[in-house]
Image (cartoon, rainbow, N blue to C red):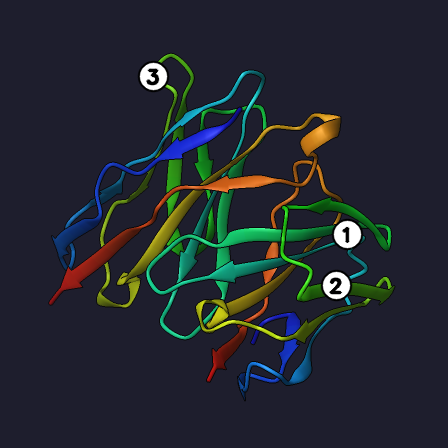
Amino acid sequence: DTEVTQTPKHLVMGMTNKKSLKCEQHMGHRAMYWYKQKAKKPPELMFVYSYEKLSINESVPSRFSPECPNSSLLNLHLHALQPEDSALYLCASSQEISNQPQHFGDGTRLSIL
Amino acid sequence: AQSVAQPEDQVNVAEGNPLTVKCTYSVSGNPYLFWYVQYPNRGLQFLLKYITGDNLVKGSYGFEAEFNKSQTSFHLKKPSALVSDSALYFCAVREFHNTNAGKSTFGDGTTLTVKP
């Protein structure tokens, strides 16, 4: 069992829908991350939060909107996505954003119709 | 800028034989190096890390890695492979400086297949 919980595990949505991905950790970590991963490829960093403040945005399109309501929760709000956005979305956390390893959730598999 | 190379897309070994998954890196400062494993339909799992100290790092599930500064390598090794080690392995490097703190660069991954 992973210590980072992501919901839902699977999501199918149309291009006009609005949905949200959720991520939760209770390890007291102060850094949280969103990644996008295509099959058999490395994860691509999207956003980094440190102490609930956005630290890095990797030039992600505005149809993806992150939110960190508190130190345990991380959301990714989705709107007007494109078929190429279909992927596995991984959340991760680490104690700090320096030299600490990341703990990953099992991801949300997103399909855009 | 930081980068990671995993020169082998695929590594095949027989069960019980030693395995090596290769990784080389490039950073301008001191590297923080990590190995992760990903099983099908799962997230990445942390195996081991090198920050400072001994060049030989021991991690989970019997894996170890050797940091070689002169060759800028951080190869993953295991003395005796198990069929259950079959998975996708990622090497990652992180260089800590303010503007990119928190950004890890991952290699393209190596698929390890251990045959009975």
Whether B28 is drawn above or below B82: the answer is above
Left or right: where B60 falls relative to B63: right
Q: Position of residue A36 (x, y in %)?
A: 52, 61
Name the residue tied to disc 2.
A66
Left or right side of B112 for B35: right
Residue at 65% across, 69% down: A4
The verdict on a common chain for dots 2 and 1 is yes
**Residue B59: percent from the left, percent from the top?**
47, 47
> What is the three-letter code of the residue carrying label 1?
Tyr
Residue positioned 77% across, 56% down in the render: A29
Distance in Å between CA atoms under marks 2 and 3 = 39 Å
Mark 1 or 3: in front is 1
Q: CA distance from mark 1 to mark 3?
A: 34 Å
Q: Position of residue B37 (x, y in %)?
A: 41, 57
**Labels 2, 3: one chain:** no
Q: Is residue B88 left or right of residue B7?
A: right
Q: Residues within 10 Å of mark 2 (few under 14, many from 20)?
A: many
Residue contact between numbered discs 2 and 3, judged by CB atoms under 8 Å: no
Disc on the earlier residue, 2 or 1: 1
Is the residue under label 1 in contact with that under label 2 (CB below 8 Å)? yes
Mark 2: which secondary structure? strand
Chain of the residue under the numbered disc 2 shown in the image: A
Write down the residue under mark 3: B71
In this view, the residue in front, B82 or A91, is A91
Q: Quick one: SS at disc 1?
A: strand
Q: Residues within 10 Å of mark 1 (few under 14, many from 20)?
A: many
Assign a secondary structure to mark 3. Answer: loop
Q: Chain of mark 1?
A: A
User: Callout 3, which amino acid?
Assistant: Gln
Give me the chain letter of mark 3: B
Q: Residue at x 56, y 65 (%)?
A: A90
